[in-house]
Amino acid sequence: MAREIKYEPEGHHESELIDSLEPDQLVVAVAKPLPRLRLSRPVRIALWAVRIFVLIITVLVVYTFVVKLMSNG
């Protein structure tokens, strides 16, 4: 598992630093893209399984909708 690395300058809490920013500085600080999260192999496999499951369920729902639509017409 990846551990979260949190950097806080000595003597300051993150919330204090954010509160002290000007609005335009806050926008710039929040707009920075986050780096990709490195996931372990089992987590990536699980996420792919969920994607495949969602696609299969979507196909089944669309098929059932079309069949019911055609049988009522």
Image (cartoon, grey):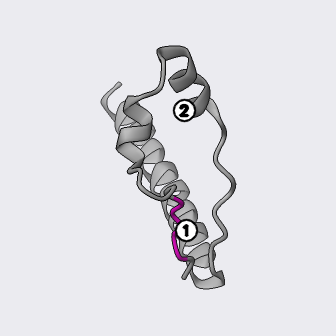
For residue 3, side relative to residue 64 (left or right): right
Q: Residues within 10 Å of mark 2 (few under 14, many from 20)?
A: few
Query: Marks 2 and 1, how far apart in space?
Result: 18 Å
Q: Residue at x 42, y 47 (%)?
A: 14
Q: Provide residue 46's location: percent of width, then percent of height.
A: 54, 75
Quarter that holds the N terminus: bottom right
Q: Residue at x 66, y 40 (%)?
A: 33
Query: Which residues make up the magenta segment?
Result: 3-7
Query: In the rendered image, which residue does mark 1 sit on?
Result: 5
Q: Provide residue 45's location: percent of width, then percent of height.
A: 61, 77
What amino acid does circle 2 point to? Val
Q: Residue at x 65, y 36 (%)?
A: 32
Name which quarter of the figure residue 72 lies in. top left
Q: Find numbered disc 2 in the image and state the secondary structure of the residue it sits on.
A: helix
For residue 20, side relative to residue 42 (left or right): left
Q: Provide residue 12's location: percent of width, then percent of height.
A: 41, 50
What amino acid does circle 1 point to? Ile
Q: Find numbered disc 1 in the image and state the secondary structure of the residue it sits on.
A: loop
Q: Provide residue 24's location: percent of width, then percent of height.
A: 55, 15
Image disc number at residue 62: none
- N-terminal of the pair, mark 2 or mark 1, is 1
For residue 69, side relative to residue 41 (left or right): left
Quarter that holds the C terminus: top left
Q: Residues within 10 Å of mark 1 (few under 14, many from 20)?
A: few
Query: In the depicted view, which residue is nearer to us: 56 or 28?
Result: 28
Name which quarter of the figure residue 11 lies in. bottom left
Q: Main secondary structure of the magenta part?
A: loop
Q: Does the magenta portion include 6?
A: yes
Image disc number at residue 30: 2
